[in-house]
Image (cartoon, rainbow, N blue to C red):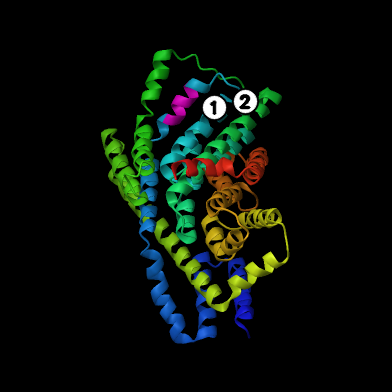
């Protein structure tokens, strides 16, 4: 059996293991280890298993992942972002679907300190959905808005997906963060347009809830947003000015979040311990998946399978636009069944060489890939954000109703993907300006 044939067999085995619901990190590691063993012998396979995990985990940029995760979990457990929705609710209530629009603003603010789609949906869902249902908003609009809004969490920095992509693709994380910031803001604007159009066409979806609160109350509500504003200034100001590395920015943000929570008296022993435990658990899972992806990359390189697949695609003579559309379709399908980080690390060893050889910017393709992975968070049958919102609402709203609610936002997401493909400079202009 040639190296390429063995490589293709290992990829087939990997897909079978994933279909059998084996955790993706163990599937990647097991299949790659077996391939190395068959191709180069027991000693080489064990040697790779001893060296590659260290090489991956010792990457300095990777140390920013637990820091940003800790920052997000502290904000989540100490409710530092709760004032965002309240301020947006008071100031935007006069707009059609004002509470839903306030949810988008709140989610965008939380995204800037969390980096997690699931955490964003869970946190804002608990705050905003009860308010919208109490105001007689249609359940599909209320839940669909929050499920979709959560996807902004992985676009606006600090984004865990973009950090891992930067490590694998070996490009600066700061540039990815700037591109992600643009994509996240455009996504939020697109979602607000969806809400405005839907409510204009059918006002019964969101009865008017104009809040006649005095200006003094609105100003007071703005003052409650200071924790998030302070954190954003501390993280982004230091990161984009070059004062902080990504790791230092994450650590500074986590420390600042602890201080702010202590000042607001929302930092309890339980909240602190829960934040630490969830950070350790999530980081460990990500590292295991990353190690498996690194082993697969090594195996595909040694077997020649990576070059074979890249050349096979390029030798078809396909137009680069056809190639990128094929990649879009691939990730749309994977997103229906796999969680985002697993899907990304599973495919990058194959996709990155194709993207690079086709002449596309790795920074631009990273933002596009992140967007596609987040679309998977709200597509059936395994739309993770939908099930997070279902857990928040309980029996009040059915899973089917939530999926119906997100379909309108899915249409906008696909329009955004088309926009990024047709005008790459939308994403690349800001990183280029600060490059």
**Residue ID at (59%, 71%):** 306
Task: Please state if 374 lies on the left or on the right of 414 as rendered.
Answer: left
Q: Position of residue 331 (x, y in %)?
A: 63, 56
* Whole-percent x, y for residue 295 in the image: 48, 72
Q: Dot 1 corresponds to which residue?
A: 99
Q: Nearer the viewer, residue 352 or 415?
A: 352
- Compared with 330, 367 (above or below) is above
Badge 1: residue crowd in 10 Å (few <14, some 14–19, many ≥20): many
* In the displayed structure image, the side of residue 144 where residue 109 appears, left or right: left
Q: Is residue 57 above or below residue 303?
A: above
The disc label shown at residue 198, or none: none
Question: In percent of the image, x 54 and y 41: which residue is there?
Answer: 183
Mark 1 element type: helix
Please, what is the dominant secondary structure of the magenta stretch? helix
The quadrant of the image that shows the N terminus is bottom right
Q: Is residue 292 visible?
A: yes
Magenta extent:
84-90
Please tell me whether mark 2 sits on a helix, a strand or a loop. Answer: loop
Q: Which callout, 2 or 1, points at the residue further toward the start of the chain?
A: 1
Please report contact status of discs 2 and 1: CB closer than 8 Å, yes or no: yes
From this viewpoint, is residue 271 visible?
Answer: no
Residue tagged 2: 206
Assign the C terminus to one quadrant of the image: top left
> Where residue 187 sits: x, y (%)?
57, 38
């Amino acid at each position: 059996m040639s190296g390429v044939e063995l490589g293709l067999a290992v990829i087939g085995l990997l897909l079978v293991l994933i279909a059998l619901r084996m955790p993706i990190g163990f599937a990647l590691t097991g299949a790659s280890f077996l391939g190395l063993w068959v191709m180069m012998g027991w000693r080489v396979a064990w040697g790779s298993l001893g060296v590659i995990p260290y090489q991956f985990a010792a990457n300095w940029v990777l140390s920013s992942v637990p820091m940003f995760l800790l920052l997000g979990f502290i904000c989540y457990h100490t409710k530092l972002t709760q004032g965002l929705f309240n301020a947006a609710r008071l100031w935007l209530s006069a707009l059609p679907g004002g509470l839903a629009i306030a949810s988008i603003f709140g989610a965008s603010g939380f995204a800037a300190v969390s980096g997690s789609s699931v955490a964003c949906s869970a946190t804002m869902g608990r705050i905003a959905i009860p308010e919208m249902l109490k105001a007689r908003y249609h359940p599909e609009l209320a839940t669909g808005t929050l499920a979709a809004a959560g996807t902004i969490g992985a676009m606006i920095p600090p984004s865990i997906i973009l950090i891992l992509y930067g490590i694998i693709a070996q490009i600066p994380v700061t540039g990815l963060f700037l591109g992600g910031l643009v994509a996240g803001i455009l996504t939020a604007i697109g979602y607000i347009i969806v809400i405005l159009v839907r409510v204009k066409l059918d006002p019964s979806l969101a009865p008017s809830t104009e809040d006649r609160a005095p200006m003094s109350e609105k100003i007071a509500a703005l003052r409650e947003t200071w924790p998030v504003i302070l954190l954003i200034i501390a993280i982004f100001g230091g990161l984009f000015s070059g004062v902080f590395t990504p790791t230092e920015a994450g650590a500074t943000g986590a420390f600042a979040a602890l201080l702010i929570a202590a000042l607001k008296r929302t930092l309890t022993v339980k909240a602190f311990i829960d934040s630490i435990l969830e950070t350790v658990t999530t980081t460990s899972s990500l590292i295991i998946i990353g190690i498996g992806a690194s082993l697969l990359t090594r195996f595909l390189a040694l077997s020649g399978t990576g070059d074979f697949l890249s050349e096979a695609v390029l030798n078809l003579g396909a137009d680069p636009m056809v190639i990128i559309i094929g990649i879009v379709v691939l990730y749309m399908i994977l997103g229906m069944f796999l969680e985002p980080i697993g899907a990304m690390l599973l495919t990058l060893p194959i996709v990155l060489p194709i993207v690079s050889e086709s002449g596309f910017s790795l920074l631009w393709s990273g933002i596009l890939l992140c967007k596609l992975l987040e679309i998977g968070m709200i597509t059936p049958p395994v739309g993770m954000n939908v099930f997070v919102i279902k857990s928040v609402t309980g029996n009040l709203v059915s899973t089917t109703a939530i999926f119906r609610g997100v379909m309108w936002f899915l249409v906008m997401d696909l329009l955004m993907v088309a926009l990024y493909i047709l005008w790459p400079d939308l994403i690349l202009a800001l990183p280029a300006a600060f490059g």
